[in-house]
Image (cartoon, grey):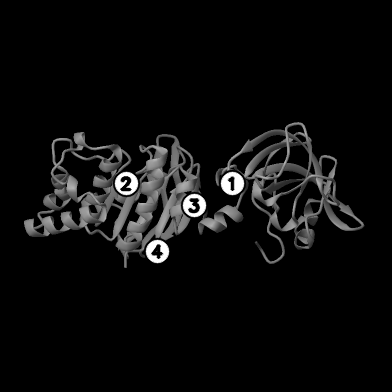
Amino acid sequence: MAEIRIENVSKVFGNHVAVNEANLVVRDQEFLVLLGPSGCGKTTLLRSIAGLGMADAGKISIDGRDVTYLRPGERKISMVFQSYAIFPHMTVRDNIGFGLKMNKVPSAEIARNVAEAAELLHIEELLDRRPSDMSGGQRQRVAVARALAMKAEVLLMDEPLSNLDALLRLEMRAELKRLLQDVKATTIYVTHDQIEALSMGDRIAVMKGGVIQQVDHPSMVYANPTNQFVGSFIGNPPMNFLDGMVRDTADGVRVMVGENDVDPGARFQRALSPYVGGPITLGIRAENMKALEGPAVGAVPTTVHVVEPLGSQNLLTVQVGDHRLKVSTHPTFAVSPDDTLWVEFPPSQIRWIDPTTEEVVQGDGGR
């Protein structure tokens, strides 16, 4: 078992709290992604787990063993860095086997582990080359192979694909996911790229300002963000947000968005009652709105500003009162700039957000 348990871990640099009482359990053989914008504390937390920067408070356990203040070499981990960190004067073979050599592993075992790792990364023919003779993608494979050759049960990866071009990053993303499914190491992967996180992780831990905001399966983080930040950070385009006012009517609780009346649905009648007479924020994703060519009951009129054909879809920018929204439509949906477009907000797809706390309001039965 190589479960990683992080309990109330904090890290402070001067007056800046980089990680604030983080609590997280990474299950044995799980691929967990730490996701967030630059400066959110994700790399600092990873370095604390690795022992490259000691936590100021809290406890870190790996496989039930307290490693909070152990040196990196005592933690039985492998790490892949953003900058590759491979030695230019060494061959690929020596780079992959370097950690094993430092641990005084027998030569025969080093040779075997290097060969296995090279085969997994499809770089067997590069073993006698030097890094200067290789592409960025090949160097990244060497860095990953070096980590795998250590046979550690915990693998830490700090934005390993960020230096690659878009096409190579897409290719490496798929290869890494397949590879780590076969290796079965407990993996923590740091990235600011939400597509990497959604496509690769078993679970995602979203961070902001040193605080873990939400930990869940990628589909749940995308569909049911816990707060407005998560909804705005996950997704391309991000979730749309509109300001509304809650009112009580003969037909139950309704929400006015500008001059438009939006039905929150039966599940939110009780949950939105405390907000009657006050503001609420409506959150909805581009693909969850229904675009109509003509008026319909419950549909909101909008003005089309921009049409972006993206092949599999058209992404529209439309105006609703003071708000501009992104709406996804089928590529055959005929619409042009300055057209009037009617948009439906299905109640089941709306996320209602408290404008003060920015937390998502839970309906009857939760999400």
- Residue under the point 50% across and 49% down: 206
The residue lying toward the viewer, choosing from 92 and 10, is 92
Say which label, 4 or 1, has the lower sequence index.
4
Name the spot of residue 135 as percent of width and height, x first: 27, 37
Check disc 2 and report its element: helix, strand or loop. loop
What's the distance in space between the residues labelled 2 and 3, CA to CA?
29 Å
The tag earlier along the polypeptide, 1 or 2, is 2
Q: Please identify, in this view, whether the residue under mark 3 or under mark 1 is nearer the observer.
A: 1
Q: Which of the two discs, 3 and 1, labels the residue nearer the N terminus?
A: 3
Q: Earlier in the sequence, mark 4 or mark 3?
A: 4
Q: CA distance from mark 4 to mark 1?
A: 36 Å
Which residue, given by chain and number where applicable, does mark 1 sit on? 312
Image quadrant for the N terminus?
Answer: bottom left
Tell me the quadrant of the picture where the C terminus can be found.
bottom right
- Discs 3, 1 touching: Cβ within 8 Å: no
- Farthest residue in the left direction? 107
Say if mark 1 contacts mark 2, CB within 8 Å.
Answer: no
On the question of residue 285 being in view, the answer is no
Q: Earlier in the sequence, mark 2 or mark 3?
A: 2
Q: Is residue 363 left or right of residue 197?
A: right
**Crowding near the residue tagged with mark 2, few <14, some 14–19, many ≥20 C-alpha atoms within 10 Å:** some
User: Depth check: 68 or 33 in front?
Assistant: 33
Q: Looking at the rendering, which quadrant does residue 143 occupy?
A: top left
In the picture of the structure, the residue carrying the numbered disc 4 is 27
* Rendered residue at 85%/50% (across/down): 296
Foreground disc of the pair 2, 4: 4
**What SS does tag 3 mark?**
helix
Check disc 2 and give the amino acid type: Met
Residue wearing tag 2: 54
Q: Which mark is residue 193?
A: none
